[in-house]
Image (tube, grey):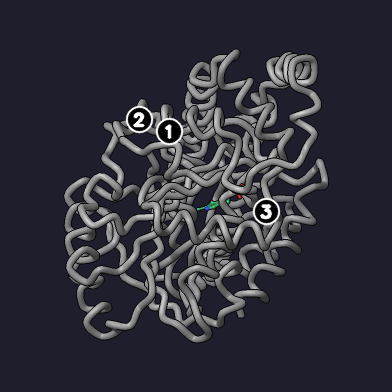
Amino acid sequence: MDILNASEIREILKVTVRPEVISFAGGLPAPELFPVDDLRRAAEAVLDRSGREALQYSTTQGHEPLREAIARRMAQAYGSTSSPDDILVTSGSQQGLDLVAKLFLDDGDVVLCESPTYIGMTQAFSVFRPRFVEVAMDDEGMVADALAQALRAHPEAKLVYTIPTFQNPTGKTWSAARRRAVMEIATAHEVPVIEDNPYGELRFEGEPVPLLKQFDPKGLVLYLGTFSKVFCPGLRLAWVEGQASFIEKLVLLKQGADLHTSTLAQHLLAEYLQSADIDANIDALRSLYRCRRDAMLEAIAAAFPPGIVHTRPQGGLFLWVELPPHVSARDVLARSLERQVAFVPGGSFFPNGGHENTLRLNYSNMPEERIREGITRLASVLREVTVGAPA
Ligand code: PMP
């Protein structure tokens, strides 16, 4: 079923490449802020200075200057004290998820995750046919008591997968108290925790929250970071950070998968981080996404019929909508595609199905006028399908 859902999303994304379609479907960053000129200069510098090295095979764990830069950035952003030796460079976090599955899972194992969760994780893990146990979420994040209960019911669970900050798909962020509580439970059960954090640096409102990793006395957290959303996804550059015994095994698994991440891409990124100002670019992304989120929230407030609830993300790329229980987001999608508006029905993000009355809206990839127009069209569909619904 996971594979079916993933292919369904691919079908929706096929429609969204048509320029006339207003797409809230993908999770694409704003391409106008890709640092093309800085990257051109970085490419010239790399090829002039160390072209032969940058085009050669390289070590599996990753280009050392890049790992050093990642460790420095983690320290700067989160006060984390990881060393470059604790970092493995991967081809996107998607590869990190694939390697993590190979490290921890055997056929049919239990995986605990948020409800809903990231579909790319269910896809990466699905080769092991895991049993996904969805743990309830509220506005503060994963419900700690529900996790404790799930771990009592499934003491054999192999890992807990989480996206605690600006979650894909809901845009929700766990509170600090909830992070502490969840980590206390994970620590007591000694279960590994995956902290997938592609969006954490894209906060445009509110106070930063500590990482799960900062409540981790036993080194159970494997942290996944990526440059896809703060730099560009096309170079496929990301990392896994964690205790040495995990990283050593992941290095071996990565060796078997692809020997190493593109040497040239790693050199380009290391040079870019050294010679350009990624933080200025992240600031620009934050203000752009804030404007786009505001445009979406304002259009929703102006046009959605009553009886519909949605999140108000403080960062990241997505917001989440819950329609009245009897309304199917797939029907809404069929009708809104006729009006050239696309989104992803939320049912796809629940590994065990259900929740067909939910949907995910992306606001990072469309200009504000298109967001307003798209939400207005979507609202007209919602008015049609919710007519006569109990509010
Ligand atoms: N995890 C989450 C939660 C994501 O939203 C994404 C991107 N959509 C990824 C992992 C994969 O990111 P990438 O492979 O581009 O680093």
Of residues 266 and 31, the one drawn nearer to the viewer in this rendering? 266
**Residue at image mark 3:** 342
Which percent across, then down, holds residue 247?
A: 46, 54
Say which element carries label 2: helix
Disc 2 marks which amino acid?
Answer: Ala
Describe residue 105's horizontal placement relative to residue 35 as left or right. Answer: left
Q: Residues within 10 Å of mark 1 (few under 14, many from 20)?
A: many
Amino acid beneath label 3: Ala
Q: Is residue 335 above or below residue 380?
A: below
Kindly indicate whether the residue at mark 1 contacts the one at mark 3 (C-beta within 8 angstroms). Answer: no
The mark that comes first in sequence, 3 or 1, is: 1
Q: Residues within 10 Å of mark 2 (few under 14, many from 20)?
A: some
Residue at 79% from the left image edge and 15% from the top image edge: 48
Q: Nearer the viewer, residue 309 or 152?
A: 152
| Residue 152 image position (x, y, % from top left) | 22, 82
Rendering coords of residue 162 (x, y %): 39, 59
